[in-house]
Amino acid sequence: MNENLVDTHELPGARLFSESRCILPLNDPVFTELRHHVRDDDPVLGLYLDRRARALPWWIMKGPHVANVAFEGRPVLVTLCPVCSSAAAFRAEIEGRRLAFCVRGMYNGTMLLADTATASLWSPFNGVALTGVMRGAILERLPLSQCLWSEWLALHPTTLVLYGEQALRESRGDPSPGSPRIPRALRATLVRPLDERLPHNTLVLGVENGASARAYPLETLARVGPVLNDLFGGARIVVRCRPGTLQALAFRRQVGDRVLMFAHSRAGEVYDEQTGSMWNESGEAVSGPLAGTELTYFNSGVGEWYEFAASHPDAEIFEAA
């Protein structure tokens, strides 16, 4: 692919694709009730907003890396880097102005986005504008789950799913979540050497709180169990996961003036100790006195360690006691 160097004073090591070779995004793609094109073991990106669910299969998102979605009238940006297994979702508007995005190049070991209105360059997983007239703007991050289609369907049986022809599936090939290879072209764009505190392709839940960051390896969370009460940067959070899967997210564990403590049964069902209400992986109480209550999402998402560490060089690594 034809590439040109970006101004190294702003983004050292970054590379831009020529405008004629930009990767085209999915713009307002079709979501359907049809499910014959999705397999149980397909990794998907799951959106759950306003009690409505949407799934975007990896094999459809691998090519464009970006989907500009209209979600019940709300503009949403969904991103996926299949190399670093990282994904994120954002409210795609600033001060009421809808923005659309595409992949414009590579930077710091992953892709680099541009908005089509101003050509400003953006980070794909923390939603920060790095250069251009939008520099310093930050998109609101939204909860996005990574899991298998069968797991998402069990959690949200009325979900709609992004449609794609099977020929598209066969053309995508590898990589898959946690694949061990970093292409040379991406490795060359890293601002710093690889952080070797963990193997580079270790899957982690990366959590951000302002300038602070913490990585929760999914293998460690699996040993802890489906729920972890934690304190991070003064915030009382709960990490919800499904042990042995890709699914993990963080939420604030405060409802009104009440700080909840969560626990789980031997069967893996999660409940709060204050009311006995049962909670699912999306941070929603499904039974008990708090049924229908949703925990506030805390900035978090699953990806590979190398990408999270590249963006957060001072990140802590959670270790189970």
Image: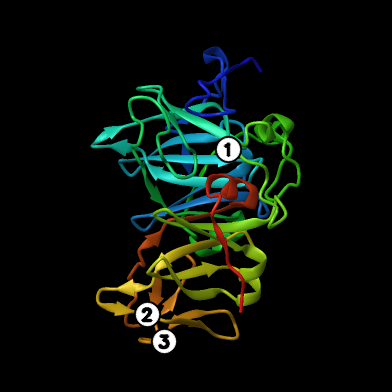
Q: Nearer the viewer, mark 1 or mark 2?
A: 2
Element type at mark 2: loop
Callout 1 touching callout 2 (CB < 8 Å): no
Question: Which residue matches tag 1?
Answer: 61
Say left or right for 139 vs 203: left
Give the numbered dot on residue 273: 3
Query: Disc 1 marks which amino acid?
Result: Met
Q: Residue at x 71, y 41 (%)?
A: 175
Q: Residue at x 59, y 28 (%)?
A: 13
Q: CA distance from mark 1 to mark 3?
A: 39 Å
Say above or below: 253 vs 215: below
Precedes in sequence: disc 1 or disc 3: 1
- In front of the other: 19 or 317: 317
Give the numbered dot on residue 214: none
Assign the C terminus to one quadrant of the image: bottom right
Q: Nearer the viewer, mark 1 or mark 3?
A: 3
Precedes in sequence: disc 3 or disc 2: 2
Work out whether residue 243 can be spotted.
no
Element type at mark 3: loop
Q: CA distance from mark 1 to mark 2?
A: 36 Å
Q: Residues within 10 Å of mark 1 (few under 14, many from 20)?
A: many
Question: Which residue matches tag 2?
Answer: 260
Coloring applied to the structure: rainbow
Query: Disc 2 marks which amino acid?
Result: Leu
Say above or below: 292 vs 126: below
Query: Disc 3 marks which amino acid?
Result: Glu
Q: Residues within 10 Å of mark 2 (few under 14, many from 20)?
A: some
Q: Residue at x 70, y 50 (%)?
A: 200
Say left or right for 89 vs 305: left
Callout 3 touching callout 2 (CB < 8 Å): yes
